[in-house]
Image (cartoon, rainbow, N blue to C red):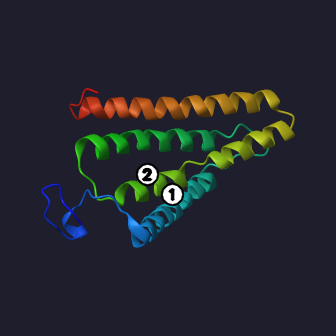
Amino acid sequence: METPAGSTAPPSDLPDAPVTGASGQGTVVAAVAAGGALGACARYGAALLWPTAPGAFPWTTLLVNAAGCAVIGVFMVVITEVVTAHPLVRPFLGTGVLGGFTTFSTYAVDAQRLVGGGHAAGAAVYLVATLAAALLSVWAAAAATRRLLGGGR
């Protein structure tokens, strides 16, 4: 592999090198899968701890999505502006763990169940509130992280 200076070095000597090639893709897929399993288990645990009754507003899913998006905001600032992370950190934590934890498929099913149960207005509020909470959470967490860590973007 060519380094910027023109010398060759094995990929292990380049911690910020992108993961490429057939074997690199398998490693990325494995990292995403492992992280996704952990994130999905955490989300499932939240649903068991705070179940939503049939026809009730799905607060657990809304809060899980907002919390996950806040963590994504912190995480992305840290790994893109503060530290040079290993190339598998972002796929494992960002796409895998946090992608498995946040649950926009359950968000859609929850809205469908609210509509099916005769709560169309509640479903509309839920759809808009979840989207707003997710976007606000990622933005606020990223801004707070930058402020705490001394960045000013």
Residue 81 horizontal side relative to residue 134, left or right:
left
Residue at screen point 37% across, 34% down: 142
Kind of element beneath mark 1: helix
| Residue 117 visible in image | yes
- Nearest to the eye among marks 1 and 2: give it: 2
Which badge, 1 or 2, comes first in the chain's sequence?
1
Residue 127 horizontal side relative to residue 14, left or right:
right
**Residue 94 badge:** 2
Residue at screen point 87% across, 34% down: 118
Image quarter where the N terminus lies is bottom left
Q: Amino acid at mark 2?
A: Gly
Image quarter where the C terminus lies is top left
Q: Examine the rendered structure and indicate whether residue 28 appears above or below residue 53.
A: below
**Residue holding disc 1:** 39
Residue 77 horizontal side relative to residue 30, left or right:
left
Res 82 quadrant in image: top left
Q: Nearer the viewer, residue 63 or 19?
A: 19
**Residue 134 position in % (x across, y down):** 53, 35
Q: Nearer the viewer, residue 1 or 25?
A: 1
Residue 44 horizontal side relative to residue 143, left or right:
right
Q: Nearer the viewer, residue 141 or 83?
A: 83
Residue at screen point 23% across, 31% down: 151
Q: Amino acid at mark 1?
A: Gly
What's the CA distance linking mark 1 and mark 2?
10 Å
Kind of element beneath mark 2: helix
**Residue 90 position in % (x across, y down):** 38, 54
**Residue 115 position in % (x across, y down):** 82, 36
Q: Examine the rendered structure and indicate whether residue 110 appears above or below residue 87.
A: above
Callout 2 crowding tier (Cα within 10 Å): few <14, some 14–19, many ≥20: many
